[in-house]
Structures are given as structure tokens and as C-alpha cells.
Image (tube, rainbow, N blue to C red):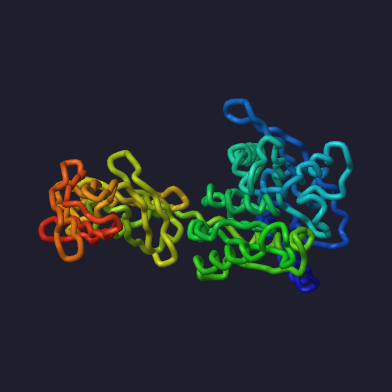
Amino acid sequence: MKKRISIFLIIFVVVLSVTAVTVYGLTLEKAAWVPDPAQNLPNPTYTFNTVMSVDGTKSMEYLLQMPRVRNFDSGGVDSKIKYPLIIYLHGSGAEDYIARYKTEVMPDGLLLDHLNKSYEFPFITINPLLPKWAYGDRHSWLNVKDLVMKALADTIKNYPVDTDRIYLTGFSLGGYGTYDYALAYPNIFAACVVAAGSHETKNAPRLANIPFWVFHGIRDFTVSYDEDKAMAEELQYQTSDSSVNFTSLAVGHELTAEIYSETTFNWMLSKKLRVDTTAPVIPDVNVVYSYSSKITGSISDELGSKVLAKVGDKVLGTGYVDIHGEFSINISKQAVGTKVSVMVEDAFKNVGSAKDIVVKLNPIPSKPIIKTISTIKITGTAEARCTIFVKSGSSTIASGNTTSTGTFSLKYKTLKKGTTIKVTSVRNKKSSPAVSVKV
């Protein structure tokens, strides 16, 4: 800390003769903000605001706090300065504590009472209060994401916000929410801090472009430490760089006092939104055959980007680019000759040109699907206009063609109950894998 203060003091002396300086990554037209533990900082300035849903049926309150800097009470927000902004998603039940600010004089205005502010704090902060109607499972914050984004939009409209430095953080239930919001809005947040949260590791590739700092107590018996650690490690694997930190703390579930510090906030300020205006290149797409259930392919330098497969205006399915530059999209089976367009959309909504492919006839027919079976008859479905062969041992006991819709119904001489038979589908002398069933 002493070393950091000394560095800032040196910088302050150097820039005394200029009219604009950069501190905390902010360009100020007036005097520099120099952290000083001894300075007499004003009490936090905050208001309660309400946002309504579009249809007017639901509402959400949020506490909006202004930056805590010298002379702020007398000078107010300087419109010449672009202020960074933090959205804080609280844990379960904490909305009652935040609401106490309406009637009580509280010592602190951000992140409940967990921050000992002995330094200037340049952030505008939005503290949403999760309404009772929104509570559900661990993804409850998703129930009010439109309202939280409305609060953010209103704040940007009414105050000078640095939109390249919008940060998201949350504790416990809000930790889950932090992951959820980063997935929902991957082009808004310059960095995210998760405290005692968790999420499904399968979603890590979609977060690869956002710096994360994940904190978790090793004695946490409320939210799984191991799950969150696995998520952080997957994020580290997907990014393959130092943009993801994971910190274990020798505490239980309540750890916000340990993590919301000057070090954490300076780490946030070191991250700036990476704005990308370049459209992705055309992806490489592997051959798609009739009755394929997936479209696969690859594209370079688009980790986490969305890949869409469309027929005309209809979206067949979506996938995401993984660390290897590969993607996989689950689709419904398509008829031979169908034209499918595959395109990539990155986090900043840049859409690349489509790769058009035509569904080809699968050289090897798919396995038959058995619907009913008895000692004298078998029915099912397979590809249209294929030949179905039914064998018992090495002997063919029945054969016949599927209809134009792919159904078949074949009879054979009475078999003993429990007999195993094998059913294959053949087209152009190419045979599908056999399906073994018991009579």
C-alpha cells in the first residue's frame, strides 16, 4: 500500500503543470484524485430509484450511489469526467439490509458494510434490490435482468458513465447472477468479480472474452467451493491467459469483507471493454448428410462466439466456438438438397458472411428404429426407400423396402420367444450398423 501511495504521489508531482491527468484510468479536467488514507472523504451520496417492466406490471428498486471523492458533496458529478460504473448483485436476503438506507444513517453505501473506504472511490454504483416476486432458484437474478438493464440504461442516460468501464460483481445468489448476466450480455462488461457463486462449466467458452476474478471460501458449506473452482479453472483453460484469477480464502460463505478492497477495485479499473468492430470470417463447415443430427466445423480467433445454422429465415440451431476453434450445432434431420447457411456472430453482434452448404445423401444409411416386435412381425422406421433385412443368426428371415415416409412392417415365420434378431438398413449396397433386439 505504501509503495502504491508513493507512486501516485510521484505521478501527481509530475503532472502538476498540465490541465488534464489520468488517475484510476480516468481523464480529469480538474485536479487529480490522489488516494490518501488520512483525507476526510465525504459520506456516500445515494438515492433510491424504481424501474418498471415494459408492461407496467412489475417493478424493482435499486440504490444508486455516486462516486466518493474529495469535494464531491459541494461539486457534484463533473460532466467532463466519465465515471466507471459497478453493478452489484446481492446475496439472498440482503435486499432487506440495503433497504435500511431509507431510514438509517449507514457508514457505507456500497456492497453493504463490507468496504473500509480509506481511499477515494470513483465508481457510480447500481445496487438492485431483488424483489420478493423474483426469488426462485439459484438463477433468480435472471428474473429481473431486463429491469437491471433498464436501471443501467437510465443511469447512462442521466450521468456521465464510461461505458468502456462497466463492471459486474455479485455475492452468493448474486455470484450465480454475475455468471448469468455475463452470459446474457457478453459485450457490456469490462470485467466481472464473483464471490461465492458458481455455474455450469459447459458455459465457460461463452465467457472467454471477459476477465473474471473468482473468490471462494474453502470452508463454504452453502455454495460448493469445488464447483466454483472447477468453473474458474475451465475459464482459465478456455482463455489460456492471465485474464482469469481464482482466489481461495480460508473462510466460510461470508467472504465479502475480504474481497471488496482497493486491490479488487484497482484490478477492475485496469480492465477496459474490448470493442470489436470486425466481422468474423466465413467458417469451415464439415459435410452434412441427410439424417445428420449435428453440424460441425471450425473458425479461428472467435473463441466464445455464437454459430447459427439457418434454413432461410428459420434458425435450426446454435452452438459456440470452443478453445480449439471448433463448434457443434444440434439440428433436426434435414432432407437431401436442403440449403443450410452457417454464420458466426461474435459478442459485439458482428455477423460474418454465411457458409452455404447443401445437405447430401448419407452414403451409409442410419440404423433402423424398432417400433414393435413380436414372434411373427416387426415394425419400425428407417430412411425412405431403403431395404430392411431381418436376420436370425446368419439366416435372413425377412426383407422389404421402407415407404416414402420411412416406415416398414415385415412378417416372418414364428420365432421362439427370447430369440435375438438383427435388423439392418441397406441402400446402394451400403449397410447401416445392425440393431439387435429380442423377440
Is 406 in front, or is 135?
406
Image side of residue 153 versus residue 284, left or right: right
Residue 211, given in percent of the width and then of the height, sits at: 58, 61
Image side of residue 332 versus residue 388, left or right: right
Instruction: Identify the residue at the far left of this view.
Output: 428
The residue drawn where x is 83% and y is 58% is 116
Is 382 in front, or is 225?
382
The residue drawn where x is 50% and y is 54% is 275
Residue 237, given in percent of the width and then of the height, sits at: 51, 69
Instruction: Identify the residue at the far bottom of this view.
Output: 3
Q: Please tell me whether residue 239 is drawn above or below residue 369 in the rendered image.
A: below
Q: Please tell me whether residue 239 is drawn above or below residue 370 in the rendered image.
A: below
- Please say whether residue 296 is visible from this viewpoint: yes
Image side of residue 319 versus residue 167, left or right: left
Is 172 in front, or is 227?
227
| Quadrant of the image containing the C terminus | bottom left
Residue 308, given in percent of the width and then of the height, sits at: 36, 49
In the rendered image, which quarter is residue 248 located in?
bottom right
| Quadrant of the image containing the N terminus | bottom right
In the rendered image, which quarter is residue 423 located in?
bottom left
Residue 384, given in percent of the width and then of the height, sits at: 17, 46
In the rendered image, which quarter is residue 326 located in?
bottom left
The residue drawn where x is 72% and y is 44% is 127
